[in-house]
Image: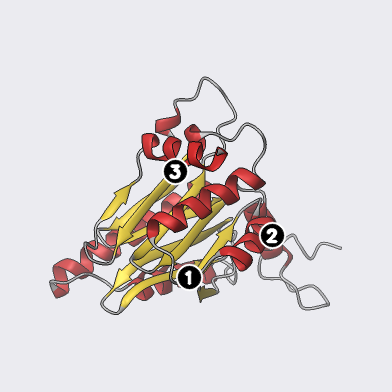
Amino acid sequence: MGYDRAITMFSPDGRLLQVEYAKKTVRQGSTAIAMTCKDGVLLVSDKRIVDVLVVPESVEKIWQVDDHIGVTAAGILSDARVLIERAQLRAQQHQVTYDGPIDVASIVKDIANLKQLTTQSGGYRPFGVALLIAGIDIDGPKLYETDPTGIYFRYKASVIGEGEVEVENILHKEYKESMTVEECFELALSALKRVVDKGFNANRVDAAYILTSEKKFTKISRAKVEQVLKQLKK
């Protein structure tokens, strides 16, 4: 009784209940997928537009941190915005200070440190968001996932949000490290199409990629999404 009232209070079985509630918030968020590919990294997310009056292009689920780094999120997106703006600032500061691009792991560690701080300080609440951070380092494509606890892991491919279990099963069966960005994009859309409700269409997709050869964050157009979805119907 009452062990979930304060973030700094452990329950008798060693759990921080407020942190666990934050992780449940992530699982209720819209699905986001990221993959490392043979020639780059890919980020694909479901924008889950619930009102026909909303302009689809105004809803953003994938953000650019630097030319070579992109992020997608699941959970409370206002929390994600704060973390991403912090990451963008860190990337700019590194460029000015060292005259070179920041590595992906440094961005991940900085975000994870702030997330962890809010799990042990009174007056805070945990960030209710998980992030997939993907980019191109000097030694190739990198992908990390951070959760509300502040822990992070490096992945070849990962998914967060409401369809996590189902999409993860698809990735375990169909994802291969030798796949190109184009092939990974088809797999990601196929997975979303199978997992998300019947109202899934191109308006709900936010997607971006970064090629190893260019190291340039590029959004995928709605026309390209529609083209791939049509191919999947055949």
- Element carrying mark 1: helix
Q: What colour scheme was applied to this rendering of the protein?
A: secondary structure
The quadrant where residue 41 appears: bottom left
Mark toward the start of the polypeptide (3 vs 1): 1
Left or right: 7 in relation to 184? right
- Amino acid type at circle 2 is Val
Q: Residue at x 48, y 51 (%)?
A: 186
- Amino acid type at circle 3 is Asp
User: Mark 1 Cα within 10 Å, few/some/many (few <14, many 20+)?
Assistant: many
| Residue placed under numbered mark 1 in the picture | 112
Vertical order, 74 against 146 (above or below) = above
The disc at residue 204 is none
- Which of the pair 84/104 is nearer the observer? 104
Q: Quadrant of the C terminus?
A: top right
> Between marks 1 and 2, how big is the CA–CA gap?
23 Å
Q: Does the image show residue 76?
A: no
Residue located farthest toward the top when viewing the structure as drawn: 53
> Between marks 3 and 2, how big is the CA–CA gap?
20 Å
- Which of the pair 112/38 is nearer the observer? 38
Vertical order, 152 against 193 (above or below) = below
| Residue placed under numbered mark 3 in the picture | 206
User: Mark 3 Cα within 10 Å, few/some/many (few <14, many 20+)?
Assistant: many
- Amino acid type at circle 1 is Ala
- The residue mark sitting in front, 3 or 1, is 3
Left or right: 165 in relation to 55? right
Left or right: 100 in relation to 179? left
Mark toward the start of the polypeptide (1 vs 2): 1
Number of numbered discs overlaid on the protein picture: 3
- Which of the pair 230/192 is nearer the observer? 230
Left or right: 80 in relation to 63? right
Residue located farthest toward the front when viewing the structure as drawn: 234
The disc at residue 165 is 2
